[in-house]
Image (tube, rainbow, N blue to C red):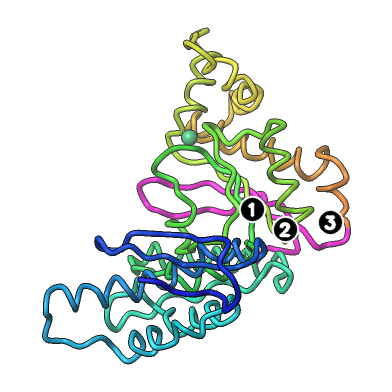
Amino acid sequence: MFFICSNVGIANRKTCNIGGTKLILRCNKDTDRAPLASILLVMSDVLRSFLAHMRTGADQAPTQGEISMLSRRSMIGTAGAVGAAAVVGGAANAAPGETPRPPAPPASELTPAQALALLRQGNADFLAGQITTVLTDSQRRLELAQGQNPFAAYVTCSDSRVPPELLFGRGLGELFIIRNAGNTVDTVALGSIEYAVGILEVPLVVVMGHEKCGAVGAAKAVVEENATFPGSIGPMVEPIIPAVLAARGEEGDFLDNAVRANVRRVVKFLREDAGPLMLEPQESGDLRVVGAYYDLDQGMVDFFDVPDDLRT
Ligand SMILES: [Zn+2]
């Protein structure tokens, strides 16, 4: 099966296998190569379904959208294929009757307060047990292939129980996430945050710790028991030790206090000491950094250490 991407010459080709049928897409210029993968992605969604109908002799005919898509094959150029993606796209991952949550507006259209409000609302839905469906279909993937525009950067622990997208009901391309055990900020993490702020222009950075954090617990064990850990685990938790020391003697649960103290230290660093890429947008009001604590049992994200102008 052949899909011709150009009327003139054949110099490059891309192939894929769909249900045992070899699909070849050709183009005549190097500049056409980049979109080929995207074109095939779109075509494969339609063809997989169409070929299944043909092979099984299913009663149901291909949908009008599939027929329309296939009938255009002789006219497909780069622009045509991308345009056709809109026909194929939609709520492909949604259950019948379920409307996916629309992606957040791009970062450039949101204030820090609006970005934080989106997260608060998302977590409220999560707490209410609402199942949030997000767009992951070919149209959305093609949009994001042109560039990402996340509305917040999120620094949190690697712990498998705290995935930000699930806690806030957000999908592809919406959160720029930096994760490591203990949600500390070293050079790599800071560079990642600075990229989100300086290049992607996110209006909000959240630093989140969580209940029963193993990394903070390890730092606590170092302080209380002079514990040692194999490999690089010891050096990894060293940056958390000052927070553990600061939390010593506070009322309440020592580990929880240390987790929050660790978040406050990172937030303070990003607000005051991280360098011009972080400080200048905060001075202009384009960026805010807030702290958060996630309760494993309740599923609630408690935003704390929030600047005055973001308090509700
Ligand atoms: Zn943790």
Measure how far apart labels 2 and 3 are at the Cα level. Answer: 12 Å
Residue for badge 2: 200
Sequence-earlier tag: 2 or 3:
2
Tell me which residue sits at (58%, 75%) in the image: 78
Label 3 secondary element: helix
Q: How crowded is mark 2: few (under 14 residues within 10 Å), some or many (20 or more)?
A: many
Residue for badge 1: 153
Tell me which residue sits at (55%, 67%) in the image: 10
Front residue (pair 46, 158):
46
Q: Quadrant of residue 65?
A: bottom left
Measure how far apart labels 2 and 1 are at the Cα level. Answer: 10 Å
Residues drawn in magenta = 284-312
Front residue (pair 180, 298):
180
Residue for badge 3: 281
Residue type at mark 3: give it: Pro
Tell me which residue sits at (69%, 35%) in the image: 265
Q: In which quarter of the image is the N terminus?
A: bottom left
Residue 284: horizontal and vertical position, in percent? Answer: 88, 61
